[in-house]
Image (cartoon, helix red, strand yellow):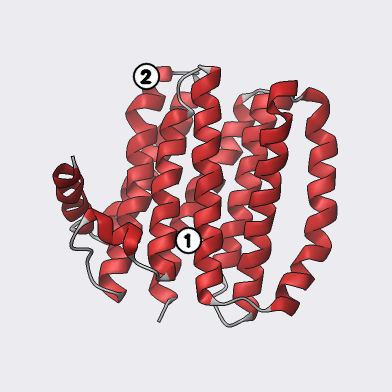
Amino acid sequence: MSGQGTAMLAVAQAVPWETALMTTAVCGALLVLGERVDSQLARWAFKPVASLGFIAAALAAHTSVFGAYHDLWDVFEADDPASAIVIGLLLSWWGDVLLIPSSEIVFKSGILAFLLGHLAYSVAFLRMGVDARGCGFAVLPVIPFAYIVLCWLMPDVPSDMVAPVIAYILVICSMVVLSVGAYAAGADELFPIGAIAFLFSDLFVARERFVAPGFVNRAIGLPLYYGSQLILAAAIYRLV
């Protein structure tokens, strides 16, 4: 299995950045069109491929700046910020796939994958170095924002999902705070931009699941989501 994973990694690293970007853009657009007619077939056909595009984009950036990974385990054993971003994108891919079925258990697994992805991004920002005053500045608006979101969601969240939703909000808000702290410490502005865009895309997922289901959530949320992931992938080029 690891040999197959390494072979897939080698293929993905050979994909040019422009091809990876177009893959996500085109399949993401087709996915939105499929969502317009509520097509489960379109979700299975386009969502995993669109998400593979942003992984290939991150690998292209990593290869250009730091060199190619030689083995699948290199991604997980490395202690650089770029590798943590790649891991976050891989976990996001799993989250995307797990959110396609209608099963409640699978949905919770997808949420867990995304939560772990946000933790991976948080690790990336910590590895870049964070400025305490920058984090403090970010906390000021993030705390009331998180409180407002919780007040908005909680009346419609099932009892068995209350703890996971609270944990998820805390993790993603912490990730945003750390991205601002990394920026204040000298990291590129693409990192907080990508983190904040990811946060807002998740709000539309929550709205779709708990508050007001409808195509508008996917029409806005999906471009925000894929845009945020491509921004974080592109930011790897700035890690020099």
Q: Nearer the viewer, residue 79 or 100?
A: 79
Instruction: Specify the quadrant that holds the C terminus.
Output: bottom left
29 over 175 or under it: above or below: above
Residue at the image position 48 percent from the left and 47 percent from the top: 226
- Within 10 Å of disc 1 (Cα), the crowding (few <14, some 14-19, many 20+) is many
Determine which of the numbered discs, if any, sits on residue 41 in the image: 2
Q: Residue at the location (14% across, 46% down)?
A: 3
**Gap in Å between the C-alphas at discs 1 and 2?**
28 Å
- Any mark on residue 192, and which? none
Name the front one of labels 1 and 2: 1
Residue 70, percent across and down? 18, 63
Describe the element under mark 2 as helix, strand or loop.
Answer: helix
Is residue 27 or residue 234 the one in the foreground?
A: 234
Q: Quadrant of the N terminus?
A: top left
Q: Looking at the picture, does residue 91 appear above or below residue 139?
A: above
Residue 232's disc is: 1
Tell me the kind of residue under disc 2: Leu
First reached walking from the N terminus: tag 1 or tag 2: 2
State the residue at coordinates (40%, 54%): 87
Is residue 158 at all visible to an observer of this figure?
no
207 relative position to 110: left or right: right
Give the image quarter of residue 45: top left
